[in-house]
Amino acid sequence: METMKRTVTCGALRKADAGKKVTLNGWVHRKREHGGISFINLRDRYGVTQVVVDDGAPAELASLTAELRNEYCLAIEGTVRARPDSMINPEMDTGEIEVAAEKIVILSRAEVLPFQIDGESGAKEELRLKYRYLDLRTASMQRKIKLRSDVAFAVREYLTAGGFYEIETPTFIRSTPEGARDYLVPSRLYAGQFYALPQSPQLYKQILMVAGFDKYFQIARCYRDEDARGDRQPEFTQIDIEMSFVGREDILSMVEGLMGHIFKKTLNTSLPAQFKRYSYDEAMELFGTDKPDLRFDMKMQDFSPYVAGGEFQAFKDALAAGEADKAAAAAKGITISGGGVKALVVPGKGDYSRKQIEELEAQAKIYKAKGMAWMKVGAGILEGGVSKFFASQAADIIKGLGAKQGDLILIVADSKRRIANTALGAVRSKLGRDLGLCDPAKFEFAWIVDFPLFEFNEDENRWEAAHHMFSYPQGKYHATLEQDPGAVKGDLYDLVLNGFELASGSIRIHDPDLQKKIFKIVGFDPAEAESKFGFLTEAFKYGAPPHGGIAPGLDRLVMLMAGETSIREVIAFPKNSFAQSPLDDSPNTVSQEQLNELHLSIVQPKAGTPADLHRSEGSPSV
Amino acid sequence: METMKRTVTCGALRKADAGKKVTLNGWVHRKREHGGISFINLRDRYGVTQVVVDDGAPAELASLTAELRNEYCLAIEGTVRARPDSMINPEMDTGEIEVAAEKIVILSRAEVLPFQIDGESGAKEELRLKYRYLDLRTASMQRKIKLRSDVAFAVREYLTAGGFYEIETPTFIRSTPEGARDYLVPSRLYAGQFYALPQSPQLYKQILMVAGFDKYFQIARCYRDEDARGDRQPEFTQIDIEMSFVGREDILSMVEGLMGHIFKKTLNTSLPAQFKRYSYDEAMELFGTDKPDLRFDMKMQDFSPYVAGGEFQAFKDALAAGEADKAAAAAKGITISGGGVKALVVPGKGDYSRKQIEELEAQAKIYKAKGMAWMKVGAGILEGGVSKFFASQAADIIKGLGAKQGDLILIVADSKRRIANTALGAVRSKLGRDLGLCDPAKFEFAWIVDFPLFEFNEDENRWEAAHHMFSYPQGKYHATLEQDPGAVKGDLYDLVLNGFELASGSIRIHDPDLQKKIFKIVGFDPAEAESKFGFLTEAFKYGAPPHGGIAPGLDRLVMLMAGETSIREVIAFPKNSFAQSPLDDSPNTVSQEQLNELHLSIVQPKAGTPADLHRSEGSPSV
């Protein structure tokens, strides 16, 4: 077959090339006819070039041109010529020229397309995933996959220059399920035994620090068998980083430099040299979440100073009940926060209707608020809602909250301060979206630090690790670790971007005795701990260095950089939200021979069980 | 805990730093005492620094120093001082200085080591893998893991600069077992269904070409469930490459540039701009293998011109039988080669003993030779062995083979030319090793091209793909593809380095009809082909570009660059040769709950079946 290899790409030709004989290879992006002349926009990864088959072309060329349809793959030989001034297209890089075709070879034909490639396809996601090879031809997907490649290279460039080694850790490891479920791989050689795929390289990167590699990174594939909900993928990619002989500040400033390099190199966007920083407690008080969106300000404020002097009994009750709970917990040696009354000033939204306010209240209730009070700011007075209970303090409140005439004040109270914070924080987030304050081209990073090391699991009546069991408790809490776990802050840090958690990390424990103490506090049976993590505590017995790390999610980073809201938009071949691939129809059945070799038999669930439900729900037709 | 963070690394200090106060962090590499003075060689990734605790140090420092053992992890504060001229160690980068310790903090202690870190451990591999974190501290492993990281970065640097995108392909795909077995991942959401892990990203990289990405690469993890033998790993890494609108020469020269960059950048070794090139047929004739070791010459030669004029019946019989077979096959329309008589001149080894020659013959017999004849070259005459049968042609033979007095001539004849070639080729390889001709610091690349597209499987009496089913038959064979598959050469190429196959690649089929024809020739049931590879042939219906690619193995490349003979030496955490990890004891059993969630039950093999055998053999004790 004749191939006629390209001499230039479809993005290369300029006015200065006029007169040159060239060969182009690419796809028919659009074709139109005008007065007997055929115009073919030929596209490749590098651009689009207008090819012209002139009126009066030889019969063979003319009839071949007539046959061409969108997405035919062609080789075209011709001569570059400058377009007349009136025909110059300033929107195209090659808009000053066209190529007069002398010969066309069809490299391969295209059937009728399931959707158009020209611009955003607008097709349903299931169809886009089934014909992903066509969807990936769109300018939008080409741009995003290139961005992902550029970001990954920028990461490697920065970290390699900084003395990091990229070290591959195994993806066939021992199953140590914690948190999410492991994906398993049955062994053929050892009947009844399995490898697990890593949820992250956590244990292995810590072992690399024990091995003395000092600075490690890996852009690593990770696997979590979670229920299909939200924007999750069975496999995802993280920028896994670990360093020895460092403290928190070393890691934070390294990541700031890394992000600065990535954004400068790929988006030509300058980030601040240092990111804003909030303690976990501050973030919860100001934004009601540990992943605040800082593209808008609107911080929550403490309304409790005005409660005692006011006449609104629900607020008073919430604080009193909170105090009582706190005292009861303290008697059991457990630290909890009391009640809270939090206010949010919404600038200029004093004109919100009752219905609009009720929608916001509904949001607060999703996060367990019992209700949401409101007031509007008039000329030196408060109006509507609960304002009558605070009339005597109106001036103090307006001044104290920094409100202005025409603003709306929203208040949530609860005997659990956490609920007051998270519920009003959810209202803040909704307002950010509703008011168009979340500009996708704006990038607001923040560090959240000083997380609690443990969370109390009320269902199971036990402490559990808030992050993971390998994080270092801050030094000042070592003495009282077991007495009051709730008060312990860890050397933990999250990197937040535009309201998303982009990375989570910590300084790790490197002392085998301290590690065992943590296992004990979270109620991990010593034999179980030994069997699952024994190889890590064993490693710690041979001179483990102090170390710590972090792991930004590559999918999410690129998603935010691309201004997208789903990681599926920045993965070449994602699974759908039911963990299936419409492209190759995986997962799928395998042969009985394969099952026999793996010493497995299938236990079909009874009708109506969850797996069965998933099966029928999970196969959306295309 | 006090950490005393380092101000410099253990490889940094020089004479000019004398007088500076520094803090070092690292491991006790060696410790010795001399006249009341303690010398601690403190090691980190960057080097070793001699720390001195002087005679008369404060009691606390002295007693702490006494406690130190090898591999304790320390922080040391002290002052840099120049060593007296007589004490300078020119072998150490830091050999001109030492650090007089003022304060030492033990960051963590080390138990008695299972083997020494100082130099090559010399420990058994099973022990090295169980305590891999200690093994990785050796200078040798540190160097190899750094080399691997450097090589991977050099690959990315070169290909990114060349306009390639690195695109991640999924590792959860559909099972399409061909050749090796797939590893499977059971789905929890869909009872009885499985994902497979990719043996390579082959289908996906071809789909990326259909998607218009033009130049793709990925350093990709691949998985093959093969029986444990030789130097195989369940997971391995390849440098996966694919390009559109290219022919063979484009890919070969791209890879030559890539290898040149890698070797220059990481080993400061210059490679030739173009690699030697042999057709598959030439390689078989000259070296008896398609992966010749070109660090030594010793090409095989054709001895058949001397057979008819000689009196050695076995050679005559071999050629005659070969001719008969060839004629019989031709009658059935199948192309095969006839018989062969091949000679190897071993320079200067005319003094080999009968026993030495018999050892070589034994090697030939492993490769199915019925025997090996020999002669020695005297002063213009042939001596010993079969020389009496060729006495009349001695001068012609000596001249024809380019032999010299004192050389040994080895000859293998067989009615199957392939056997004569491969058996004598195996003798050539053994001689290369025995005679020390395989210098690990020498790198001899070669391309092997023009491979047969099909091989006849005599057991199953059918043609099968020699490489894989997606490789393009060279144009001149398209018309006779189905009549005479044995004659068809493919656009296939292998990159060979020092006797190892480093990469395999081909120009691919991009025509759905041609692809279906290939499926048919290899006896692939159309329905089966459709169900397994339908998504690829479907993709080809929408304007697939001509494309091709290659995939160098990263593990093997780094192994050869490091002068090693096992890929386990260049993988941070390899499995042993029984596909097990002594570090984390994987694979291992999982909980009944995990099995239930995956809708699986275990079918224990009967005693004495292969899996059971593997089980007992496969767990070597440490």
Image (cartoon, coloured by chain):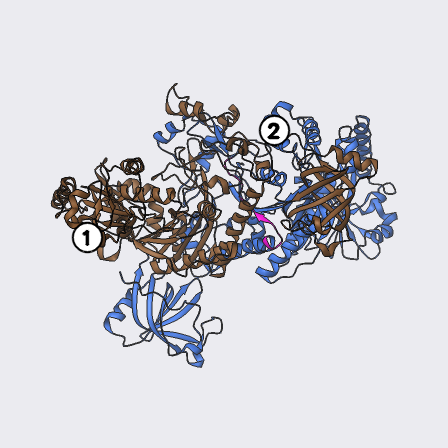
Chain colours: A brown, B blue
Q: Nearer the viewer, residue B368 or A273?
A: A273
Please provide the residue range marked out in magenta: B160-172
Disc 1 target residue: A395
Residue type pointed to by label 1: Ala
Q: Where residue B234 appears, x then y in whole percent?
A: 51, 40
Please identify the quadrant where the N terminus of chain A is shown. Answer: top right
Is B600 covered by the magenta stretch? no
Asked whether residue B219 is in view, the answer is no
Q: Tally the marks.
A: 2
> Label 2, label 1: how many angstroms apart (C-alpha)?
74 Å
Answer with left or right where residue B101 lies relative to residue A3: left
Q: Where residue A355 appears, x then y in whole percent?
A: 30, 35
Answer with left or right where residue B224 lies relative to residue B330: left
Asked whether residue A288 is in view, the answer is yes
For label 2, the SS is helix
Answer with left or right where residue B176 lies relative to residue A543: right
Disc 2 target residue: B534
Q: Where residue A405 appears, x then y in whole percent?
A: 27, 50
Q: Nearer the viewer, residue A72 or B103?
A: A72
Is B171 covered by the magenta stretch? yes
Q: Nearer the viewer, residue A11 or B8?
A: A11
